[in-house]
Image (tube, rainbow, N blue to C red):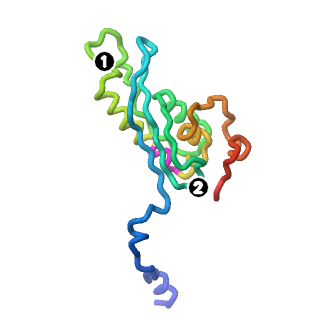
Amino acid sequence: MSDTAVADTRRLNSKPQDLTDAYGPPSNFLEIDIFNPQTVGVGRARFTTYEVRMRTNLPIFKLKESCVRRRYSDFEWLKNELERDSKIVVPPLPGKALKRQLPFRGDEGIFEESFIEERRQGLEQFINKIAGHPLAQNERCLHMFLQEEAIDRNYVPGKSFSRCCPGWSAVA
């Protein structure tokens, strides 16, 4: 066996971990929570919104903390934008629950607490999978979804951040 083969399998020398390393903030983190569902409106104009809170230290995000309110159709918009313009496989959203929207039901349908909680959990899994993907983190639609109060549905996909979002700069 040659010396190069042995050298390739040796352990790397690592420095001992101190308390600051062990209990300090993680080097890179991205936390997204979906919480505080609120149902608003009446009749056919009734819908549920969710707070989307993001905390990160990743340099690609302009804001390190943000909290916006989104409804299910906003998540659908994000999914459609990513499927159209990115090279990533986009995970599915929790279902539309069409049967729960039928008239003359004996329950609250899509406005039942148990359904809203189940959907909240599914939306949280969806957005964390998407936002954790390095290629998705470069997509303007994800940044708008997570950090801007209102989504500009007329934005131009593929436009670089520096031209469309003043103050934003890409970090390699």
93 and 74: which one is in front? Answer: 74
What segment carries the magenta color? 128-133
Q: Secondary structure at mark 2?
A: loop
The image quarter in which residue 101 lies: top left
46 and 18: which one is in front? Answer: 18
Please state, as top left, top right, bottom left or bottom right, where the C terminus lies in the image: bottom right
Q: Residue furthest top?
A: 104
Q: Main secondary structure of the magenta part?
A: helix
Residue 26 bears which disc, if any?
none
Give the residue number, with chain letter if any, for mark 2: 59
Give the residue number, with chain letter if any, for mark 1: 108
Q: Amino acid at mark 2?
A: Pro
Q: Measured from the top left, where is residue 77 in percent x and y?
A: 54, 31
The 10 Å Cα crowd at callout 2, few under 14, some 14 to 19, many 20 or more, is some
Q: Measured from the top left, where is residue 160 in percent x and y?
A: 70, 45
Q: Nearer the viewer, mark 2 or mark 1?
A: 2
Q: Amino acid at mark 1?
A: Glu
Say which residue appears at 52% left-offset and 87% top-offset: 4
Say which residue appears at 48% left-offset and 31% top-offset: 70
Q: Secondary structure at mark 1?
A: loop
- Is residue 3 shown above or below 59? below
Q: Residue furthest right?
A: 163
- Could you give the CA–CA distance between mark 2 and mark 1, rounded to whole angstroms? 43 Å
